[in-house]
Image (cartoon, grey):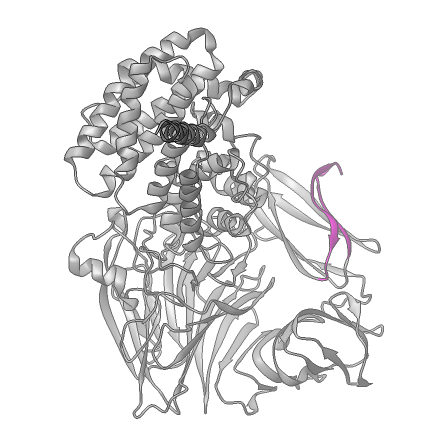
Amino acid sequence: MVNGKKSYTLICIFLILIVFRSNSVYAVNHPYIIVTEAEYPQLIEKSQEWPWSEMKESAKSKTLTMNVRMYADINQITCDVHDLAGAAALAFILDPGNKTAYLNVIEQKLKPAMARIRIKKENGSDDHGYNVGPAHAAFAMYLLLDIVYNDVDTALRQTIENDCDYIALNHKNSWKASKYAIEGLSELYHNGCSEIFITKKNDYKNYVLDNTTADGIYGAGPGYAESRFNMDNRMQKKIFMDICEYQGYHEFYSNPRLQNLYEWHYGYSVTPFNRSYTFGDSPPTKQINDWSVAALRVNRFSRLAQSYAVWYIGEFDDSAIKGHLMQFLLCDSLPVTKQKPTSRIFNNGGAWLTEDNHAKDALAGALWNIETSQLPSHAHFEVNAIHIAAYGQHVLRNSGYDGWGEPAAETWEWLHNTAESSNTLMLSHKNHQSKYGGGITEGLLDADMDYVNGSSDKALVLADHARNFHFIKPSIEQSNGYFFVVDEVYSGFIWKDDVPVSTAWHPNSGSEPTITQDSTVFTWPSLGGCCYGENQVGLSICLATKPDEINIRKGYLGSYDACSRFNGKYLYNTYYSQDNQVSALTFFIPFDQVNPAPGFHCISLESVDAAKIDHGNNCVDYVFATLDTGMIEYDHIQFQGKTCFWRETNKEVDWYFLRESTSFHNNRSDHKGFETQYPVTIKFHGNIGTVISDATEIKFFDKNIESVLIDQSEATINDRNDSFVSISLDSGKHDIALLYNNMVVKGQVNLINDFQLFQNYPNPFNPTTSICYSLYVQGHVELKVFNVLGEEVASLVNQIQNAGEHRVLFDASNFTNGVYFYQLKTSDQTCSRKLLIVK
């Protein structure tokens, strides 16, 4: 019996030791969550330099002078607590001589404020404001308590901990980025990197990634990307990942999906005039205009993302200083030099097409087509939806957002759950079956034009929709830009009757359009919404494929700002299928007082939808769309392909583009063009081109072609004579250059190493202008600007560049009025032109 008691006692002691050891694994020594006391001297030294010196002074001042609005609404109180706690934490570290004053602020201001937030939460509802807002305050308080842990009164600390813990552990099972972040931080504060913390960290990471496409598009749309990844409010949603990184879980900064997400958000979630594209629950009014903590530290994910942020926000200066712990700790360097976003395709999320100069009045269009593993609650039925911006205004927009469930149940259903409320295509007048599409299946980005193809995948029942979105870019002193769409719908099943296929097009206007050219051109001369530019902007929607039915309908367009909330007047066009398929060609031509719309004329041909765009000055574009695979002839052009575009200048073909094509023949003067064994997508300007293909043989027609470069390497010639050469192409996208035997090529250039330097546009200008040039082979290029004394004042390019057309934006904001010269130099040639700055 004695032995039994001894054994029992030993077992109990053993179990107590196990429990003790288990708990001691997670024992923590504060501070450690985002900074340790050993780092304080280095931080104090850092605070002697700008901008960290200003952050320190701001934190000291804010901590001692700021008051919490105790009787304001819960959102204001939580924001005040977050700001004051962040300032107090930073001041405590950097100004140790005044610790007592900062500790008094915790007792006198923050303790009663946290108690007030808790009471409001206990007596409040399950709404967003009583969950995410309090978590925002508790997030900052945990960080502050971690830092002052060994100096603050124990009873005071425990009182505030209890309030923070109540907030953290009673977060509604919604708004999961916030929920996982505050629960994870609470566990980290109390128990370190425990198994529970790791679970919360993984839940948080997986939730963020599951709502993001494989290449970085946030499925809830630009509006909620701004809320969850940029703005300082609700900081727990975006900064918890930085805490995880500090704790040694290096799963965020190096994650390609998050790197792309930040590049997309800071470069492509907003239009050139810095207002959000309307995909998902996104109003047309959000902007990137604040050096938030997330923006300052985004270089940890991608320096390119931060260079985009500088482009929109502007240089970091004293006005951007916030005396906050996280701004100081996470801003480890000054923001990099700004860089303009250029056209980019995200295969799993969409495509953003823009002018190369990306000025505020630049033209830009986006096609939305997301594939994510989790359906975001803020996503819409808008597979293959498009948004177009031009001259500082939204010209074609989607349904938008007033706020969750707003403004009324019926209108909310229209905005959030109806495909027709966005610029989409529908089958049999029915809603989409999925918010996911098949992504971008093909694309070509070029100096003259951008093109992408989006697949509907399962969004339509028993049919496939391919939306081909084209942006014809403005050409210096030649033409203004515009967009066109070729919609193709196919069925793998035999439809019993003619099935209606409908498109909805939503100009940013509540006015009735003017209708001309036998109901094929609908023009809104003055668009609505909040004014972001100085010009009155209009839009013409031109129907090269005339619908069987045309309706002008009324539908609500949502926005946070009253000036952009109204009942819009939109086009609802219906086409009836023939042979289980439909093809529709639609143009979108924006204009303002400076950039008039070109002439639009439909071309009548059997089995082909076609139009002519006349820019004046002997510059004319021709666009053809057909599902017929036979040879199409028009004037001097013969082609086989689904889409064919060519531009003529002075009645000579300047450049051409074809999709799913096997031939193009220009029979005027010398025979030029191509033929292929299998269909290709191809674009050629002079002797420089791009081909997207499966493995095929391609024959180029022109006189005296000496050799062909494929991706900078000389190709093997399969066959040739005086009028053509034939080569083989592997599958993929290839850059092609046709090299001639001492013959004149585009622009009267005699040597293949020569280039063309164009006059800058606009000229005169203030403060930016575009300088364009064409290179006929790869080589080292220098582009410099000189004053009238011959002194170099700017170096714009100094690098090896590929053959093709290039465009450089020259920003003369810091230059005085007057005449300057820009010079392009290669190893063989130098050319200069004059430009004029007028302010």
- Report the front residue among 322 and 246: 246
**Quadrant of the image for the N terminus?**
top left
- Relative height, residue 277 to residue 729 (above, below): above
**Main SS category, magenta section:** strand
Task: Answer left or right for 264 relative to 169.
Answer: right
- At a point 84% along the width and 56% down the height, the residue shown is 828
Q: Please tell me in which quadrant of the rendered image residue 77 appears.
A: top left
Q: Which residue, as the protein is rendered here, is positioned at the far left?
A: 123
Any magenta on residue 788? yes
- At a point 26% along the width and 63% down the height, the residue shown is 417
- Residue 821: horizontal and vertical position, in percent? 70, 45
Task: Answer left or right for 739 relative to 667.
Answer: right
- Residue 588: horizontal and vertical position, in percent? 41, 68
- Residue 498: horizontal and vertical position, in percent? 31, 90
The region drawn magenta spans 779-803
- Relative height, residue 548 to residue 127 (above, below): below
- At a point 35% along the width and 76% down the height, the residue shown is 460
